[in-house]
Image: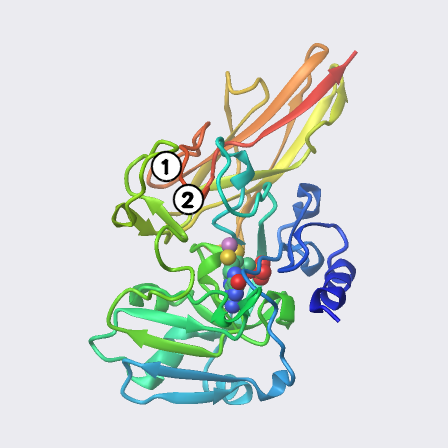
Amino acid sequence: MPRRLVELPLLRSLKPGLHVHDEEALNAEPSLDLLDEAITPLGAFFIRNNGELPEIADAGAWTLTIDGEVERPAVWSLAALRETFETVTQTAVLECAGNGRSQFSPATDGLQWRLGAVGCARWTGVRLADVLEHAGPRRSAVYTAHHAPDRQIGNPEKAALSRGLPMAKAVAPETLIAFAMNGEPLPRLHGGPLRIVAPGYPGSAWQKWLDRVSLRTQEHDGEKMRGTDYRMPIRPLRPGEILDPANFAVITDMPVKSLITRPADGFTVAAGEMVTVAGFAWSGAVPLAGLELSHDGGRSWRAVALEPGEGPYAWRRFEARLPAGEPGTLTVMARAHDAAGNRQPLEMPWNPRGYCNNQVQRVRGAIIG
Ligand SMILES: Nc1nc2c(c(=O)[nH]1)N[C@H]1C(S)=C(S)[C@@H](COP(=O)(O)O)O[C@H]1N2
Ligand SMILES: [Mo]
């Protein structure tokens, strides 16, 4: 029986509100009203797989190998990892680099995500830095390579995805090898028993089903780390221009962004009433600095306070009540900025693979008389 006949119903029962983009690889995202919580529940968290879910016969027998440019290669059982290293919890946003891709025109290749390929969870595990330190990284090590058993659909010889991190991010205190999500054992759909958590980096860097970390003397060139995969052009490109991969750089820190989770697109409000506008803002490495709202289609903006988040990598809530004027249309927009002065663009410049779209979201409603 094809595996998806088993796995698709599983996904639908665990995550009933998700829109499934791809039934074979199981790629699915929630509607935005399901994201209206500081900690995204497991049942609303998007799923992104580049290949087939791996077969995991006995999660308890899982091992993690550390090798490559290290003095003391090691093989860890789950129990030994947990006993040896300090357990830490990091609240962090996980966002697919392709989130919002469906807004690019002309359309680009890749899953046509709307705006729901993002969530914020509490990730618990051990620091990748501690595990690497134990193995004694050599000076020659500049990049990690992460490996997992999932394979491409129709091509079981090839890994679905094998990405890595520059050493500085690998040994940063926020980077984890996680075994729990929102206080529960990490679900298989989210990479259990072990995954990388790289706060601020795109989802692609958060390797699921992690079974090997290998230190390398050069930037990793595994599956989905070559050509233009998860890379942005270093200068603006026009649609149709010849692409030279030398002009692309690996996506590292994700840009400042916000999401309006309320009201929903197509809302109605009576003239003279107030509309509650709520959602979240987040940023990759540079701290968030503020957020403005507009309810006149971007003609005027007003600053709105951000609530504190659960640490530097969590998203922060905003909520404001805006007046609905005369009958007609009402377009609500949110625009966040970071401490380096980067502000969400009204229009994201096009890029060939449709990545890192942080353009201001427009939620359109009607004021009725
Ligand atoms: N082994 C493996 N890890 C992976 C992937 C994958 O296909 N295989 N996809 C990556 C991508 S592109 C994203 S956006 C996140 C999604 O994590 P989630 O499914 O837990 O939401 O996992 C990442 N880790
Ligand atoms: Mo992704």
User: CA separation, marks 2 and 1?
Assistant: 8 Å
Q: What label does residue 342 carry, if any?
A: 1
Q: Does dot 1 land on a helix, a strand or a loop?
A: loop
User: On the rendered image, what quadrant is the C terminus found in?
Assistant: top right
Q: Is mark 2 within 8 Å of ligand 2?
A: no
Q: Is residue 160 visible?
A: yes
User: On the rendered image, what quadrant is the N terminus found in?
Assistant: bottom right
For label 2, the residue is: 255
In the rendered image, residue 290, in percent from the top left (x then y), is placed at: 46, 37
Where 221 sits versus 111, above or below?
Answer: below
* Mark 2, other Cα within 10 Å: few <14 / some 14–19 / many ≥20: many
Q: Is mark 1 within 8 Å of ligand 2?
A: no
Where 262 sits versus 113, above or below?
Answer: above
Q: Between 218 and 304, which is closer to the camera in this rendering? A: 218
Q: Is residue 91 visible?
A: no
Q: Amino acid at mark 1?
A: Asn
In the rendered image, residue 353, in percent from the top left (x then y), is placed at: 44, 44
